[in-house]
Amino acid sequence: MKKQQLIRHLLGALAGVAVATSSHAQTAPAFTPAVQAFIKVNAPVVALTDAKVIDGTGRPALLHQTVLLRNGRIEQVGSAKKVKVPAGAEVVNCTGKTLIPGLVMLHEHLYYTMPAGGFFNIAQMPYSFPRLYLAGGATTIRTAGSIEPQTDLALKRLISEGKFIGPDMDVTAPYMEEPGMDIPALNTVKGPEDAAASTKFWADKGCTSFKMYMHATRADLAAVVREAHARHLKVTGHLCAITYREAAETGIDNLEHGFMASSDFLTGKVADACDYPAAHQALQRLPANSPAMADLIKFLISKNIALTSTLPVFEPYTGREVVLGGGLEALVPQLQERETAAWQNNQGKDTASVALFKKEQGWERQFYNAGGLLVAGTDPTGAGRTIAGYANRREIELLVEGGFTPLEAIKICTLNGAIYLGRDREIGTIEAGKQADLVLVNGDPEKDIRQLRQMEIVFKQGVGFDSPKLFESMKGKVGLN
């Protein structure tokens, strides 16, 4: 592009931004044409008629319901025979279909596994992942750890202004991690004073959550908890050097990856030292119905600790999908080849992972049955088989595989997440007065949970986005941006 053409192009782009900003001030959000292309329903009043409603509370589903949406909120939910459809409403016939709440998922990232030579590394996916999250029914996410927090915060703003497609986001600050892992994109801190300063800095920038990582110490955690809680913000952790019991005693709010990151059962564990292989082996040796695990669960619940299930990132290879939730085609061709080769190489060679995965499913069920707040996410990192949107639906399937009913699994991925975020009065269930975040599924996931993959429309604040069209638009894009 010649210099003059480039200048004209940039000026035109800036003019477009100015127009969008001006219109946003009048009708927030004023969706750009690029966003409007994926909107299927956008009217002041919408009537979703004759639907099966799984409301997210865990209560039995209701048949033949009409849900009225007005100006981005749920106005009425009731029998199709009794709810009067207002004149002029846009009507969506939901016969044979199911409405569930928009998913509230608490371990998401806007990056994907992209090795740097021989080193494990991660790269930001600022365009594809927000779209895929919304396509997969996630209307609210927490990014449980950032590598480009400035990008995540900017995306949150751009989405709210109608310029990007994606969910509402609670942005977590960069990882609180001591030096110890050779991951180029990973943030590190040096001691509790640095951790406290980092917490203050990113809280002032707009981050609403903080995440401790594997080599962080008890002193680091105490410093972050002190600064975060002073601002009424929460702290979670993917731990190793700190045990779950130590973290709970120090005031952490949430623990990630179910019990897969617990080092509590490692005999002779050295304080503030991370020996991940040994901790992992201790979990492999731990019986499924261990009294020691039951005691830890009881203690965590007594401290009001939420536990995040992230089953997709641990799903074994043998006899399962290459990319969880059916998203292989979302990857660029080179990554499709990489993941397929890894999948083929691991068939029949992951019996230890299969055994531990089944135990983890059972431990999460024990935590839930004991009264713990179990929330959910996907963690699109690890081996590279976990992709935004596709994995969100897969998490629900895996909860059901582990013994939860479909109604329980949906509640974990909707209302429970909203409760943790302190937003359950606004989101997480299909109830009159709440924000109109809903997902229309062409089928009945209570009869067959895999029918969740047949999402048609994802309503975010009453605006219905075309789920299949969003998925289609991102095929072959993950790995690029």
Image (tube, rainbow, N blue to C red):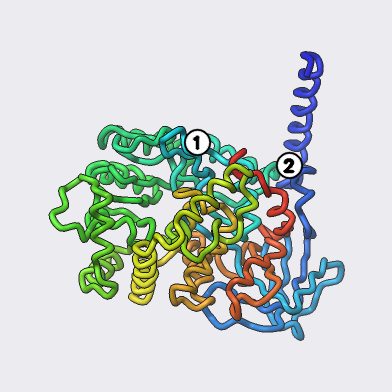
Foreground pick, 206 / 13 = 13
Kindly identify which numbered label has been placed on residue 362: none
Q: Looking at the image, can residue 372 be seen? A: no
Q: Disc 2 to disc 1, how far (Cα)?
A: 26 Å
Residue 228 location, x and y as percent?
Answer: 36, 45
Kindly identify which numbered label has been placed on residue 24: 2
Residue 248 location, x and y as percent?
Answer: 26, 57
Q: Nearer the viewer, mark 2 or mark 1?
A: 1
Q: Amino acid at mark 2?
A: His
Residue at the farthest right position: 88
Provide the residue designation for mark 1. 148
Q: Secondary structure at mark 2?
A: helix
Chain-order first, disc 2 or disc 1: 2
Q: Is 251 displayed left or right of 397 in the figure?
A: left
Residue 117 location, x and y as percent?
Answer: 45, 33
Number of numbered labels in the structure image: 2
Q: Secondary structure at mark 1?
A: loop
Foreground pick, 116 / 473 = 116
Q: Is 314 displayed left or right of 136 in the figure?
A: left
Quarter of the figure that contains the N terminus: top right
Q: Amino acid at mark 1?
A: Glu
For the point 35% across and 67% down, the residue is 355
Quarter of the figure that contains the C terminus: top right
For the point 24% across and 67% down, the residue is 286
Disc 2 crowd, CA 10 A, few/some/many (<14, 14-19, 20+) = some
Q: Give the image quarter of residue 56.
A: bottom right
Q: Is residue 232 above or below residue 297?
A: above
For the point 35% across and 57% down, the residue is 255
Q: Is residue 362 above or below residue 236?
A: below
Residue 444 location, x and y as percent?
Answer: 65, 77
